[in-house]
Every structure is written in C-alpha cells, then in structure tokens.
Amino acid sequence: MAHDIRILTEAELRQVVKLDLAAIDVVERAFAALAGGKVIMPPILSMAIPEANGEVDVKTAYIPGFDGFAIKVSPGFFDNPKLGLPSLNGLMVLFSAKTGLVEALFLDNGYLTDIRTAAAGAVAARHMAPEMVTTAGVIGTGVQARLQIEAAHLVRPFTKVLVWGRDTAKAEACAADIAARLGVDARAETDPARLVEQSQLVITTTPSRSPVLMADWLHPGLHITAMGSDQGEKNEIDSQALTAADAYICDRVSQCEALGELRSALATGLWQGEPPAELGQVVTGAITSRKSDNDITICDLTGTGAQDTAIATHAFSLSIKAGKGTAISS
Amino acid sequence: MAHDIRILTEAELRQVVKLDLAAIDVVERAFAALAGGKVIMPPILSMAIPEANGEVDVKTAYIPGFDGFAIKVSPGFFDNPKLGLPSLNGLMVLFSAKTGLVEALFLDNGYLTDIRTAAAGAVAARHMAPEMVTTAGVIGTGVQARLQIEAAHLVRPFTKVLVWGRDTAKAEACAADIAARLGVDARAETDPARLVEQSQLVITTTPSRSPVLMADWLHPGLHITAMGSDQGEKNEIDSQALTAADAYICDRVSQCEALGELRSALATGLWQGEPPAELGQVVTGAITSRKSDNDITICDLTGTGAQDTAIATHAFSLSIKAGKGTAISS
C-alpha cells in the first residue's frame, strides 16, 4: 500500500522550524516524558572510520504520547574542511510510532540538532536559572554560543551579554551577531572569571578537554548550563564546581556518566554517593533544583535521542501546516 | 555547499537492482572484506516498542574499498496486517565513505535486504555446495524461499526443486512460483526428511523456534544453508547437525553466537572448542570448507551490515547508470 513520504531540505527546514517558544516547549515535553520512565532510548550506535578521520553516530528514542519517533544519523568527517565541505552533516528520519512506516526525511545537515540543543538549554534556564537574569555570559564562540543565548533570552529576557573565547576576534564577532539579533548590549569579555562574576546565567559551549570554568568563580545566584561535552574526552567545568553547587542536574545520568561533566567528576573521585537528578525531574516538579535566588545550580547537557524525536515530530507537524517539502510515494 | 541526494523508491529499485550474478558478486566481495579484518561493523542498534508490538533495528558497516557505507533502518510492526499494512518496512541511507555526505536514500521497504540476503545464500552455495547439484530443497514457503532458490540456481543450475512447509497449500504455491520463474520441475514435498534425502542443497528459510531439519537426515554430499534464524529465540537446525557436519561456517561468528544456529548449539553445550570459521574465509580461500563431494557442509546466515553496504553501493551505481530516482539538492 503506497504512502507518501515527505522530504525536507535544510533550506526548507530553516523556513519552517524556528528557535522559538514552541520548539522549547516540545523539547521540554520530551524531558518530562524521560522523567516518567516510559521513554525507550537505546545506547548510541557509534562507528569510527579512522581511514577517513570520520565517525558516525545514530541516536533514537521512543516517547509515549508522541506520534512518531526519529532516528538521527550524524556523520562527522573532520578532513572535510580541506575539501571545502562542512565536517558535520546528517539527517533525521521520522517513523510512525504506530506502524513503523517512514513519514518524513529531514535532510537537515544538523540544523534540527542545533535547534533542539539550544532548546534544551532554554529548558534548563527556564527551570533552574534565577527568576531575574540581567546579564548572561557565554563561553565559546560557535553556532551554539549564538543559539544558546538566543534560546535563553526567550525565557530570561536579559539586557546584557558577555562572550569569552580563546580567540578574541571570534568572541567579538559572536557578540556583534548576538547584539544584532537580539538588540541587547553584547560585548567580548577578555577574562572568563570576570565574565562569570558579572553574570547570573552562564552557558559553556566549547569542545574543551580541560575546564574553562573554575569552581572558585562560583557566586551566589549563578546558574551554569554546560552543553559542550558530548564525548568521553571533553570537560568544560572544574569537577569541584559540581559538588560545590547547590544542585547539579543531568539531562540523562547514563549519558553524563560517559560523555558529560559527570564523567570527569567520577574519574577524579570527586563525585561520590547518589547519582544526580535529571532535568526531566526538574521539569515535572518531582524535584526542586533551585530553592532560593542565591543558590548555585549547574545543568549538564549531552544531548538525547528524546530531543531528536521531539524536534522531528515538531518539524513534521510544521511542514504539513506550511505545505513544505517534496512528497514521494513509496 | 549544496550537493544532490538521489532518492529511489521501491518501485524504481525493483526496476534497477536485480537478483543476478552482479548482486551476488558484490555481496561476495563484502564477505571477502570481512575476512580481511578491516571491516568496521558495530553491534546492531535495536529498540523494542512493546506498546505498538513493534521493533526497529539499525545496521551499518564500513568496508575498505567501497565508496560508500550504508545505514539500514528496519522497523517491524507486527500489528500492521490488521491495518492492511505490511509488518516490515524500512530504508537504507548511503553515505560517502570519504566525506560522510548523504549520497542516496533508498525507500526500499526491505527490497534491498531481500536481494542481499538471497545473494549471501548464493555465495554460500557457490563456495560450499557440491559442484553438481541436481535437486535443491527449500524448507519454508515465504519470499526468501523463492529468492534463495532463484539465487542458488544462478550458481548451481539444478533441474528439480522440492518445497516443504507446515502449510501444504503454501508449499504448493511456492513450488508453482519457482517452476514458473526458473522453468524447473518444482513440487511440494510433504515430508521434510524425504526432501533432504533427495537434495544435494537444502536451504532453510523459516522463523522456527525448534529444529525443522534433524541431524539424522544428513547424508554424504549435502550442503545446508540455514538463513531463517536472526533472533535469540530462533533455531532451525538440530544442534547435533552442526557437530556432525564436516564443516559448519558462520557469516559472522559474533552474530551467530547471539542470533544464529550457533546460539542453540552453545546453549545446549553441544558446540565446544574453537569458534567456527566465517564465510569470508571460505570466499578468500583462507580455509576450505568442502574437501570432497561427499562432505556435509552447513552455512549459518544471520545477515550482516556489510551486505547492506555492498548492496546499497551496488544500487547507487546502477541507479546512476540508469538515470533513475529523484535528485534533491541539499
């Protein structure tokens, strides 16, 4: 029995799927479902191809109550820039959760991942940052530095942004982009300790393998979202900070143990005792991460298949409403 | 930098990719590469969705010397027939092995899997069956019963085919299809022991959970290809047969231990000592499975990601030559 499969390119997806409150809400719903314990999220399938300096990861998750589930394939081929090609590519496939039929192919080259990653940062900020944030800081100067700030601004309308990067020119360019996009006062800060000191919300978005944010920079009323570490060698936050904070929360404990800030804290023996709580539990109110405006909170994001299923379902619904994409009868 | 992605539907793939010697040869090349030890083939990603009586498997493999690698997604939703839909669907995505860019999407609903599975049976028959096969038997009456016989006929042009199934009407229909397709004498046989007795080549293609072929039916000059078992509960061949045979060969030992006939033989303690050899070693000549026309040989096929990469690469090359498919610029 033939059925139509909808195919959307990156350009079409950029027209249809925006980094807005709707995207944040659908990703928040995925985190709430994760806390419910009924999400099925197998370990990531990962294949390294050393001959081509490449790797490919496959993520998926089934979320009860969502009409579809996504399978995301993310290749990273790190010699591509020599050929004038981007390192990261990939696509998502959306399947019906009732019949397993392919419903849509999103040839997004990572765009939907960018959106769902930034949206998770906003979910963390919404539920964990102090109510009043006047200055937000970002450590890192890439695509996610821009998008995380943009997403956080939707839930905490700060008026000032500080950007730090190892390369000051890149930090200045990033600050200029943010100022233009959000109409806020944004500037590069040359000292990351000074950046943290002035901010109530700090987001780390680097691929660093050694801490870029130290425990003795923590101050009352600070929230940190660390979203850079997604591999076994990465580490952005001084492990001492995890135990010094009033609350340290993971997107998914099993992933953070292997890929996130928790990995380093476990390796050094600094994190002992109970596993941390998860963001979904904060979203549903099962736990309270911030008990006062003076608390220090940290959220560790490694990126989950549940977010992919959430954003793919959202993209499908928006594509249909907008009549976008090419239908292929299969 | 935009590039074209070629999309082919099942109907287009059926026009372009045939079960022929070219398909058998490309799958044989994948097995030879597997024996070379340089193939990268991660464990299968598998997600069960009990709420929908469904499951989804993801397979992949990188084969040095192949221009691309495939990722295959195979959903099986077993309540679909109630909705008038097939249980099995799925697609393959072909990536460049140099850049990780998506090159093609094959919306094949399992057609390419059917072809690469039958082709593997022909590779086993080519390298393991006696030179002279006049009668081939098949146990099972489904799509693979037909395709395995068709593929084996390309490498061993037998003149007679016997078909056994629990449902005699289905066995008769299968025999009629085979007779019409290959122009051979094909008929249903009501006793599986009699089928084996008369055949030099027997293929088992059932989802059985208890043996359909007993050890005391073995006779000199018999080759068996068991391709039905691909899950931890399945078992087609009496485990005694594996040790009684002169050679028992796996497509991939690590998979057969978990999913194939070897699993049952290990569970009962009947298989002891060295792990079996692999089909790739037979293909390259590293080992000789059949030392005389009177030997008894068994090949256990569970299906490998390497076959998927082989058939997807083949399908891409044929599609380009035939100018088939829809190009989408991404």
Image: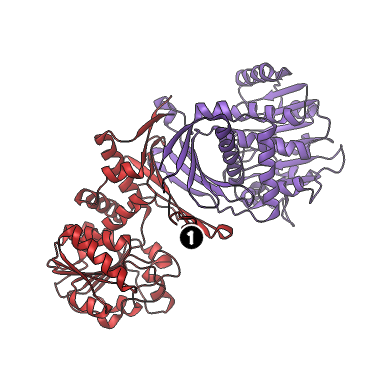
Chain colours: A red, B purple
Query: Which of the 4 image quarters holds residue A105?
Result: top left
Q: Is residue A38 visible?
A: no
Q: Position of residue A61 (x, y in %)?
A: 38, 49
Q: Nearer the viewer, residue A45 or B92?
A: B92
Q: Position of residue A284 (x, y in %)?
A: 22, 56
Residue A293 drawn above or below residue B129: below
Q: Nearer the viewer, residue A284 or B316?
A: B316
* Residue at far bottom of view: A216
**Residue depicted at x 64% and y 30%:** B19
What amino acid does circle 1 point to?
Phe
Q: Is residue A67 visible?
A: yes
Q: Nearer the viewer, residue B296 or B302?
A: B302
| Quadrant of the frame with the N terminus of chain A | top left
| Quadrant of the frame with the C terminus of chain A | top left
Q: What residue is disc 1 on?
A: A78
Q: Chain of mark 1?
A: A
**Residue depicted at x 42% and y 79%:** A268
Q: Position of residue B123 (x, y in %)?
A: 71, 38
**In-image side of A68 versus A73 (left or right):** left
Query: Which of the 4 image quarters holds residue A176?
Result: bottom left
**In-image side of B114 versus A269 (left or right):** right
Tell me how many marks there are. Answer: 1
Q: Residues within 10 Å of mark 1 (few under 14, many from 20)?
A: some
Residue B179 drawn above or below residue A65: above
**Residue depicted at x 50% and y 51%:** B100
Q: Position of residue A287 (x, y in %)?
A: 23, 64
Give the structural element (helix, strand or loop) at label 1. loop
